[in-house]
Image: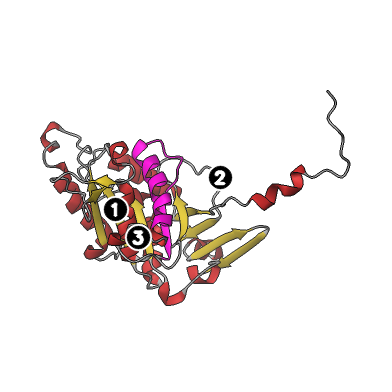
């Protein structure tokens, strides 16, 4: 009976060095919890990525009354599985996405679509003046850094979550790179037309969607089986995706667990290397 109860509990485990912090709330194990200022932004290269990587975690954020925003980068236009879907798949997947995330408690208005063409993200790196009919333009500019900077400033997240840089899909890799530099744009004074600078750079975590983490994660989330069933039902909203059944089975077999890896930005500090070049005994160079 005890083992069964253990499996049905909510538990957060964070590894900090040799220390193991365990609690039943995220606030209880967080290294930098900000109370009422907490606001989570999940970045989804494709509409179903976040529910696969963090469908349990989103539910627990709702439980702790943390506002959740989902930023969906691409329009889903390359996700068709039959010839009949080719011209309608974007709208179909949009409605499936609303059904998915609202079932997890995310308000419809917190699901944000950037609308970049699916599989075209290499064309939208950086920031540049927009063409007249580009639907992704904001304040006369287009580009991933333009959109990310705008929405980071607008939503003011305390913590951000995005798929690991290890994912094989080029869209995932590009989103990872462009989002990280956009965090620093958003906290600076550059491009003032995109909004007021963020108070500080948000904390960032990676979630695994398809491929493993580049280094081991430090946070584990465990939930009751009812949370897992809710996550599976949310994934199943993507009925247009023929492979969805196999994804559901993979998630089901993994159990009510998810993992996160915290990203720490290591900025250059020349002083760290000074002692490497200082010798106690100087040996003259001999020609």
Q: Position of residue 176 (x, y in %)?
A: 41, 46
Which of pointers 1 and 2 lies earlier in the amino acid sequence? 1
Q: Which residues are magenta?
A: 158-185
Is there a contact, CB below 8 Å, between mark 1 and mark 2?
no
Is there a contact, CB below 8 Å, between mark 1 and mark 3?
no
Q: Residue at position x 52%, y 63% from top?
A: 12
Q: State how the image is colored.
A: secondary structure
Cα–Cα span, label 2 and label 3: 26 Å
The disc at residue 152 is 3
| Residue for badge 1 | 147
Cα–Cα span, label 1 and label 3: 9 Å
The disc at residue 215 is 2
Which of pointers 1 and 3 lies earlier in the amino acid sequence? 1
Left or right for 244, reference 133: right
Cα–Cα span, label 1 and label 2: 29 Å
The disc at residue 191 is none
Secondary structure category for the residue under label 2: loop
Q: Residue at position x 29%, y 60% from top?
A: 194
Which of pointers 2 and 3 lies earlier in the amino acid sequence? 3
Asked if the magenta segment contains residue 234, the reply would be no
Which residue occupies the foreground of this view, 57 or 183? Answer: 183
For residue 273, say whether it is visible. yes
Q: Position of residue 218 (x, y in %)?
A: 56, 55
Q: Position of residue 103 (x, y in %)?
A: 26, 61
């Amino acid at each position: 009976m005890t083992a069964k109860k253990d499996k049905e509990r909510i538990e957060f485990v964070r590894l900090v060095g040799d220390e193991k912090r365990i609690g039943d709330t995220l606030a209880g194990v967080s290294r930098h919890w900000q109370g009422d200022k907490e606001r989570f932004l999940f970045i989804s290269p494709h509409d179903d990525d976040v529910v696969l990587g963090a469908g349990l975690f989103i539910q627990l954020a709702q439980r702790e009354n943390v506002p959740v925003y989902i930023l969906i980068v691409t329009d889903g236009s390359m996700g068709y599985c039959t010839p009949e879907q080719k011209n309608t798949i974007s709208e179909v997947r949009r409605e499936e996405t609303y059904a998915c995330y609202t079932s997890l408690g995310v308000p419809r208005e917190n699901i944000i679509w950037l609308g970049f063409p699916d599989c075209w993200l290499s064309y939208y790196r950086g920031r540049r003046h927009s063409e007249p009919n580009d639907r992704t333009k904001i304040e006369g500019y287009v580009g991933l850094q333009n959109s990310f900077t705008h929405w980071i400033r607008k939503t003011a997240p305390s913590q951000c979550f995005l798929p690991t840089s290890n994912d094989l899909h080029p869209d995932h890799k590009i989103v990872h790179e462009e989002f990280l530099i956009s965090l620093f744009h958003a906290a600076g004074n550059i491009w003032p037309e995109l909004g007021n600078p963020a108070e500080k750079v948000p904390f960032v975590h990676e979630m695994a969607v398809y491929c493993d983490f580049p280094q081991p994660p430090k946070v584990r989330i465990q939930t009751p089986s009812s949370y897992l069933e809710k996550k599976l039902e949310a994934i199943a909203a993507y009925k247009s995706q023929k492979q969805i059944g196999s994804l559901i089975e993979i998630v089901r077999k993994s159990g009510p667990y998810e993992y996160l890896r915290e990203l720490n930005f290591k900025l250059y500090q020349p002083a760290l290397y000074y002692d490497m070049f200082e010798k106690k005994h100087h040996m003259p160079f001999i020609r």
